[in-house]
Image (cartoon, rainbow, N blue to C red):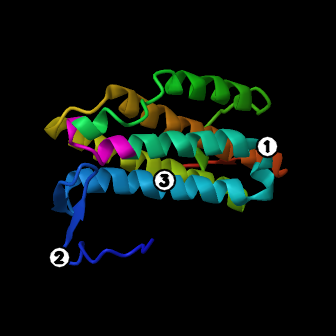
Amino acid sequence: MRIYTRTGDDGSTGLFGGARIGKDDLRIEAYGTIDELNAWIGKIATHDAAEPLRSPLQAIQSELFTLGSHLATTDPQWAAKLPALNPHGAEGLESWMDELESGLPALSSFVLPGGHPAAADAHVARTVCRRAERRCVSLHRETKLDPVGLTYLNRLSDALFMVGRWLTHATGNQDIPWKPND
C-alpha cells in the first residue's frame, strides 16, 4: 500500500467517509494536535525510567487514537462504525494519578518543567494536551463533540503533570519549585 495519495496537494485532506476539508480547518487542527500528543506520549514511553508506566501510556495512546477517529469523522454512518470513547476513561486517569501521587512528596508550590529528560518530555506532552483540549473546545463551539472526549483531555493533562512528577522522583531527582522574582 502506498502511503502517498497526492490528493492533499491542493491543501485539502479527507475525513473518514470521504468528505474533504482544508488542512487548516479547525477539525484538522484538533485531531492533528491529538496526533502530536500521541507522539509525545510515545516518546515518554521510550525512556527507561518510564518502563513501569508503558502499559498505561499505551492505553492512553489507544484512547487518543479513538478520540482522533471521532474527530476525523463527520459522516454518521462512518461514526457508527467507530469504537466508542471510554466513558470511564477520566475516572481511570484519576485512579492512576492517585496511585502515582501516593509515593511522592506533597506538592507545596508550582514546579518548573524539567528534572530529567523523561520528566521534561511529560511536561511537553502536558502542554500539547492543553493545546489539544483548547482546539477541541473551539471545535465543540462549532459542532457538538462527545463531552467524554473533552473530559478525558482535561484529565489527561493533569495525569501528564503527575507522570512528570513521578518520573522526576523515579530518576532520583527533585521537583524544581517555582520561585517568583522578589
Q: Secondary structure at mark 1?
A: helix
Give the mark nearest the N terminus, 3 or 1.
3
Tag 2 near tag 1, CB within 8 Å: no
Three-letter code for the amino acid on which mark 3 is drawn:
Leu
At 45% across and 58% down in the image, what residue appears?
Answer: 36
Residue 42 lies within the magenta run: no
- Could you say which quadrant of the image residue 46 lies in? bottom right
Q: Nearer the viewer, residue 122 or 165?
A: 122
Three-letter code for the amino acid on which mark 1 is drawn:
Pro
State the extent of the magenta-drawn residues as a range.
69-76
Q: Secondary structure at mark 3?
A: helix
Kindly identify which residue carries mark 2: 10
Query: Is residue 63 positioned above or below 148 on the image?
Result: below
Kindly identify which residue carries mark 1: 52
Give the mark nearest the N terminus, 3 or 2.
2
Can residue 23 be spotted in the picture?
no
Q: Nearer the viewer, residue 172 or 47?
A: 47
Comparing labels 3 and 2, the label whose residue is closer to the camera:
2
Q: CA distance from mark 3 to mark 1?
A: 20 Å
Outermost residue, right direction?
A: 172
Left or right: 158, with 8 as reference point:
right
For residue 37, which numbered disc appears in the image?
A: 3
